[in-house]
Amino acid sequence: MNTSSHIESALTLRDRFKTATRGAILEAAASSFASDGATGVRMEDIAARAGISVGTLYNYFQDRSSLVGALLELRMRAMLDGLDAQHDADAPFRQRLGRFVQALADHFEANRSLLSVLLEDASSHGHDGRATSRGRSVLREVLTRAERLLADGVHRGVLREGDPTVYAALLVGMVRGMVWSALARKTGLADAAPEIVAVFLNGAGRR
């Protein structure tokens, strides 16, 4: 018997089990938050729905904030994959910009309760380092896509000559600002995207 192959097979099986367990936890968390409201869900509730012990749950996620952060990251990546899948370089630039901003606004609106949990936990216990790191990683991916889009806008002459990196930071910053404002004021984001696009392209000054 090949000992090396046996060890490799065991490691692969263990990794697959860990991946499946993590997926089951995230699925249980999503179901719990959807049915019971994010702020009222306890780690014990999620563990019970996933069919595991609370101790096992804490082996994967150190607290509720890290679990919510991982779930948000998973959903954000799905949203970005959707943007990539529907990429159409031949569409008018303003339409593509509108789709990009609308996708971000829709994502945050759909996950409003999860974001509220992060704000609540951060104010009570401080920021979770791993969740913050994951958030920065996802933000970099958003900025990369925004920069690519805005560089094309400069190339097409729709945007004035400038640094696409700066433009991307400004655009994404506007979206994030609207999100946190909406959370603080408990208002919706349904109509935010067209306003963001209009201000970004035309400015806020009176014409």
Image (spheres, helix red, strand yellow):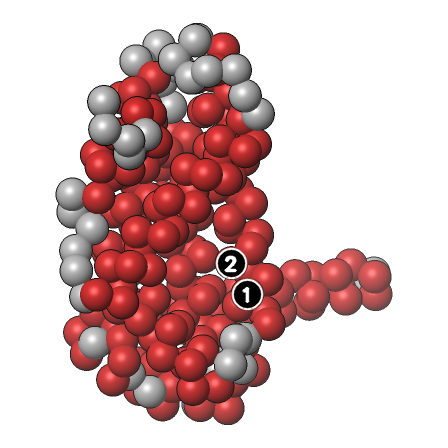
CB under 8 Å between callouts 2 and 1?
yes
The quarter of the image holding the C terminus is top left
Q: Amino acid at mark 2?
A: Gly
Helix, strand or loop under label 2: helix
- Checking the image for residue 132, the label placed there is 1
Q: Nearer the viewer, residue 1 or 86?
A: 86
Front-lying residue, 163 or 38: 163
Which residue occupies 30% across, 51% down?
178
Taking depth in this image into account, of 149 and 24 the one nearest to the observer is: 149
Neighbor class of circle 2 (other Cα within 10 Å; few <14, some 14-19, many 20+) is some
Alpha carbon of mark 2 to alpha carbon of mark 1: how far?
5 Å
Indicate the secondary structure of the residue bearing disc 1.
helix
Q: Is residue 5 visible?
A: yes
Name the side, left or right, on which 19 lies relative to 175.
Answer: right
Q: Is residue 99 visible?
A: no
Of the numbered discs in the image, which one, if any, rests on residue 135?
A: 2
Question: Residue at position x 56%, y 32% from top?
Answer: 165
